């Protein structure tokens, strides 16, 4: 039956691969492919570097890393090197003037004087009325309250300094957070002149601190990591060993494991059918029907009607029946899939270096992400700083003729004016200039660069691994005929000849991913204004793009395998791979699902084991370990547990991605082996004896006896 399907598929999806006596594995004498794409990719990278250079020349990331005082000078740098914290004269103005979102968007700038200080105030203090006639030096400097603006003279009357907002009228016990002094949320507020102590202000201060004061938590997190980092490394080491053992032992346990997993799925479905039947019986006896409930948006109410459980029972029964039919009629293909999994385990065991190639991919991905992050940061902070005149109350008669919001020089002498509190403050970066005019385009260029480089790095890893594993399959005598350094040879070969082909496939995928990002952004912006019809259309578009991305990833992956083997360009390789898979579509589906099920179980096994061990260790539930193996005392015991689980998942994903690539490569080689060879002395099969036995085929003479290298 399967052979007939394959013959019918040959007519619709091209002719089988013809026998080539010169073919003995990945082609060594090959030429560069997709040269135009290669040139465009290199030109794009040069432009990417040029954009980074421009951003570095014009950008100023200190705006993000360091707070600014009222004059635009950075705290913790230059003349303020010993003053790393920013103090707000009137922190309440941040709450009264605007909301927290607006404050955050403007770099936490508030309509109040701000000064760089060496340390934040530790006690509450308010200027007493009896101190108005004293000098600034007597009230502030001698009492070690160095919180006035720079340059305020010693002999200036306190009343005048307060009127001109050169010194603060009160201080609150504060703690530094994000380089700024924020009041303690649990401190008792003193009686402040002109400030209401109503509940809304207190809640506003608390909300501000809840969102910004992360110093306490960050210190505790740092302490926990310092106490447990070596045990986290031990947990990650356990994850690495478990992942490696799982892959290597598949050659022994792949068959029983797949059988157990399939029986487990059947058992779960059977239990679901039983549970739905019992629920249906109970509700049927009660007479609970959907006609009594009617239509409602409360979907949980549908669980109390018999029709819901009857529909679920029917669906589960159909799935159970389909799965049983698949096991009966596709058992031969399942055996082939298990044999290929065992063969992949042997291939990985013969080329252990492939298991650690994901480290190379990880480093390259990290470089791409770090470069884009710095590029975006420098571009966002490019431009000349702009300073304007500002006054706390421009409605006063003495402030009517003051040029408020006009540009000024913060380093110039203060302007003589009767307007109280007039000062030159930092407003932001100018939006004019060569870089600023093209800022949006440069950011778009950077986003395209991020997606393109990331997908190219992933494509490089897939093609390199495919070349290494293909050399394993097409070796006559394993391991004798396997190249000495298959991974290194595949890496050099891919970079030398197929950079353009990888760039072509990565570009197609990047454009689809960017389209998805744009669609998600539009959906987020218009979510509140959409009607049901628009939401349905948007959902359909998103679903279509998601399916398109999955298909392109699948096509690219198999195209890279064909590129690694034959050295042809991307389009030809993608077409040949697609036709080959479509001629064997049933085998493709069976192998894909069996592999997915097995790798999912492997990930759950590794992550579950590491998670359980981490939980029992870090919570001190493993007695008798001795002093050297005691669990550390932690503020948040869940932190190292979650870190270990996340790290275990990343490690397992890295190992199993290599194994998945090995399975896909061997599968394509297996399909071509079936088409180009027939087991005769002139055309012997390259597959293992286990696969030959399952297919009922054999080589008339051993391959090594006929073809000597």
Image (tube, rainbow, N blue to C red):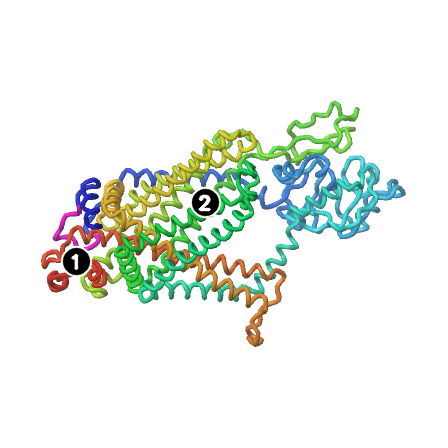
Residue shown at 49%/29% (left/top)? 533
Q: Which mark is residue 311?
A: 2
Residue 25 in picture, x, y percent from top left? 20, 55
Residue at image x 83%, y 39%? 193
Give residue 288's position: percent from left, percent from top: 55, 44
Alpha-carbon neighbours of circle 1 within 10 Å: few (<14), some, or many (≥20)? Answer: many
Q: Main secondary structure of the magenta part?
A: loop
Observer able to see residue 494: no
The x, y position of residue 535, in whole percent, is: 49, 32
Q: Nearer the viewer, residue 602 or 129?
A: 602
Residue 74 magenta-drawn?
no
Residue 439 screen position, x and y as percent: 49, 33
Q: Which residue is mark 1?
A: 685
Residue 247 sits above or below residue 310 on the image = below
Task: Quote the CA–CA distance across marks 2 and 1.
Answer: 50 Å
Q: Is residue 216 left or right of residue 577?
A: right
Helix, strand or loop under label 1? loop
Circles 2, 1 touching at the beta carbon (< 8 Å): no
Q: Nearer the viewer, residue 69 or 532?
A: 532
Residue 298 appears in which quarter of the rendering? top right
Question: Which residue occupies 21% across, 43% down?
Answer: 9
Label 2: few (<14), some (14–19) or many (≥20) C-alpha neighbours in 10 Å: few
Where disc 2 sits, the SS reads: helix
First along the sequence among labels 2 and 1: 2
Give yes or no for residue 22 being in the magenta stretch: yes
Question: For the magenta stretch, what is the residue range?
Answer: 16-27
Q: Is residue 560 visible?
A: yes
Say whether residue 245 is left or right of residue 88.
left
Give the farthest residue toward the top: 401
**Residue 656 lies in what quarter of the image?**
bottom left
Q: Nearer the viewer, mark 2 or mark 1?
A: 2
């Amino acid at each position: 039956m399967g052979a007939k399907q394959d013959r019918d598929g040959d007519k619709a999806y091209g002719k089988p691969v013809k026998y080539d006596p010169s073919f003995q594995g990945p082609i060594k004498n090959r030429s560069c492919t997709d040269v135009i794409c290669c040139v465009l990719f290199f030109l794009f990278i040069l432009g990417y570097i040029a954009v980074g250079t421009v951003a570095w020349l014009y950008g100023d990331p200190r705006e993000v890393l360091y707070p600014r005082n009222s004059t635009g000078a950075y705290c913790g740098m230059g003349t303020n090197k010993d003053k790393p914290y920013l103090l707000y004269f009137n922190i309440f103005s941040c709450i009264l003037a605007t909301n927290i979102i607006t404050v955050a968007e403007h770099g936490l700038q508030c309509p109040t004087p701000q000064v760089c200080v060496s340390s934040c105030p530790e006690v509450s203090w308010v200027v007493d009325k009896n101190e108005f006639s004293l000098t600034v030096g007597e009230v502030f400097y001698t009492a070690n309250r160095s919180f006035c603006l720079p340059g305020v003279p010693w002999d200036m009357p306190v009343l005048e300094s307060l009127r001109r907002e050169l010194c603060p009228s009160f201080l609150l016990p504060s703690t530094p957070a994000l380089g700024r002094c924020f009041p303690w949320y649990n401190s008792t507020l003193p009686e402040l002149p002109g400030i209401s102590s109503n509940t809304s202000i207190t809640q506003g201060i608390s909300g501000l601190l809840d969102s910004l004061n992360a110093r306490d938590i960050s210190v505790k997190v740092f302490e926990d990591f310092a106490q447990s980092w070596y045990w986290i490394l031990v947990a990650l080491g356990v994850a690495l060993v478990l992942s490696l053992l799982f892959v290597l032992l598949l050659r022994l346990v792949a068959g029983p494991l797949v059988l157990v997993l399939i029986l487990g799925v059947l058992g779960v479905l059977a239990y679901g059918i039983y549970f739905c039947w019992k629920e249906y019986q109970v509700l049927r006896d009660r007479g609970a029907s959907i006609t009594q409930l009617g239509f409602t948006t409360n979907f949980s109410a549908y669980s109390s009607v018999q029709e819901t459980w009857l529909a679920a029972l029917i669906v589960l029964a159909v799935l159970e029946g389909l799965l049983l039919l698949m096991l009966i009629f596709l058992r031969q293909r399942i055996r082939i899939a298990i044999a290929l999994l065992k063969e992949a385990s042997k291939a990985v065991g013969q080329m252990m270096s492939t298991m650690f190639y994901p480290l190379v991919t990880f480093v390259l991905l990290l470089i791409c992400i770090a470069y884009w992050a710095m590029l975006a940061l420098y571009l966002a902070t490019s431009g000349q700083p702009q300073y304007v005149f500002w006054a706390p109350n421009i409605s006063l008669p003495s402030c009517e003729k003051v040029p408020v919001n006009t540009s000024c020089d913060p380093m110039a002498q203060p302007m003589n004016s009767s307007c109280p509190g007039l000062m030159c403050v930092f407003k932001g970066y100018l939006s004019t200039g060569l870089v600023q005019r093209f800022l949006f385009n440069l950011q778009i260029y950077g986003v395209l660069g991020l997606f393109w480089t990331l997908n190219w790095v992933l494509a490089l890893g897939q093609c390199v691994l495919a070349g290494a594993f293909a050399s394993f399959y097409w070796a006559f005598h394993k391991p004798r005929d396997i190249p000495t350094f298959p991974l290194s040879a595949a890496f050099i070969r891919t970079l030398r000849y197929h950079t353009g082909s990888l760039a072509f496939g990565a570009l197609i995928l990047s454009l689809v991913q960017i389209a998805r990002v744009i669609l998600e952004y539009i959906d987020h912006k218009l979510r509140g204004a959409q009607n049901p019809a628009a939401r349905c259309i948007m959902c359909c578009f998103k679903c279509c793009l998601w399916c398109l991305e999955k298909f392109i990833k699948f096509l690219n992956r198999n195209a890279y395998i064909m590129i690694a083997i034959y050295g042809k360009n991307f389009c030809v390789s993608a077409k040949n791979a697609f036709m080959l898979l479509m001629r064997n579509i049933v085998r493709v589906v069976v192998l894909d699902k069996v592999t997915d099920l097995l790798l999912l179980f492997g990930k759950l096994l590794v992550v579950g084991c590491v998670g359980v061990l981490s939980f029992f260790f870090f919570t001190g539930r493993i007695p008798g370990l001795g002093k050297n193996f005691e669990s550390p005392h932690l503020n948040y015991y869940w932190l190292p547990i979650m870190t270990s689980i996340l790290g275990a998942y990343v490690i397992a994903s890295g190992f199993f991605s290599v194994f998945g690539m090995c399975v896909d490569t061997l599968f394509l080689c297996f399909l071509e082996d079936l088409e180009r060879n027939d087991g005769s002395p002139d055309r012997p099969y390259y597959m293992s004896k286990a696969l030959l036995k399952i297919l009922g085929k054999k080589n008339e003479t051993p391959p090594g006896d006929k073809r000597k290298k």
